[in-house]
Image (cartoon, rainbow, N blue to C red):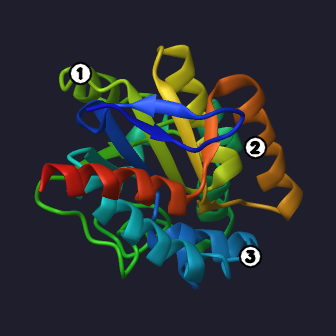
Amino acid sequence: MSITLTASPESLSFDPLRTALIIVDMQNGYCSPGGYFGHLGVDLSPADRVIPTIDRLARSVRRAGAQVVWLQNGWDPELKEAGGPDSVNQRKGNSLKLMRTRQELSGKLLTKGGWDYALVEGLTPDPADIVVPKPRYSGFAGTQLDSILRSRRIDTLLVCGVATNVCVESTIRDAFFKEYFPVLVHDACFQAGPDFIQQATIYNVEKFFGWSAVTDDVVRACDGVAAVAA
């Protein structure tokens, strides 16, 4: 069943059974005081709004029959997945730089098995959801995400999470390049930086890479499908 989502710059029709909600990096490191973003000085206050918004969004798209995929950013404790000594990721990755310069943080930021890497309290994947570890900003870089989506005939991606201007936008750009239809659910995201950064990503997505929408409109569209199915 095709449904129409109110979006910008124009409405978009999609089939929930060929749609995935991509939840990007809702981890303690990015959302909780004492985590990686906190050490970096990012304003975490939007997390209190975004966490319940994403939970509501996930419940709604599940009821409509869409797939939920959680992306989880980080590396093994030995940092082999972070790249070799000459890797640009090692050079530019702020969490990696912090762990090198602040000994008390060594092995703690975005490290698999640790608190910083774990999904934030208040968001729990459903047994039917899929969790995809990722070693870079984009959910498609060095992961099985593309194969997971294509094997399920998914062509439309609702994308939310953190940070809007980094991992969320990177994932949306790669989705566009791979011929998916990406939708930024912008009120279920927050940025690393001032508010104009959030607005810049919304502009980029609407103008060049896809569509943007708000949670209320996504839930309204998905709940309409669920009601018909019932």
Q: Is residue 168 above or below residue 127?
A: above
Local crowd size for mark 3, using a 10 Å CA cut-off: few (<14), some (14–19), many (≥20) = some
Callouts 2 and 3 close, C-beta under 8 Å? no
* Residue drawn at x 58%, y 85% as measured from the top left: 33
Residue type at tag 2 = Thr
Local crowd size for mark 1, using a 10 Å CA cut-off: few (<14), some (14–19), many (≥20) = few
* Residue drawn at x 25%, y 44% as measured from the top left: 67
Q: Earlier in the sequence, mark 2 or mark 1?
A: 1
Residue 68 lies, in percent from the top left, at 28, 49
Tag of residue 201:
2
Could you tell whether 74 is left or right of 32 in the image? left
Looking at the rendered structure, the secondary structure element under dot 1 is loop
Q: Is residue 4 above or below residue 51?
A: above
Looking at the rendered structure, the secondary structure element under dot 3 is loop
Residue 102 lies, in percent from the top left, at 65, 71
Q: Is residue 29 visible?
A: yes
Residue type at tag 1 = Arg
Q: Earlier in the sequence, mark 2 or mark 3?
A: 3
Residue type at tag 3 = Asp
Q: Earlier in the sequence, mark 3 or mark 1?
A: 3
Give the residue at mark 1: 153
Residue 148 lies, in percent from the top left, at 23, 29
Between circles 3 and 1, the one closer to the viewer is 1
Looking at the rendered structure, the secondary structure element under dot 2 is helix
Residue 49 lies, in percent from the top left, at 58, 79
Choose between 206 and 104: the one closer to the eye. Answer: 206
Q: How far is disc 2 from disc 3 in space, using C-alphas?
A: 17 Å
* Residue drawn at x 11%, y 59% as measured from the top left: 127
Give the residue at mark 3: 43
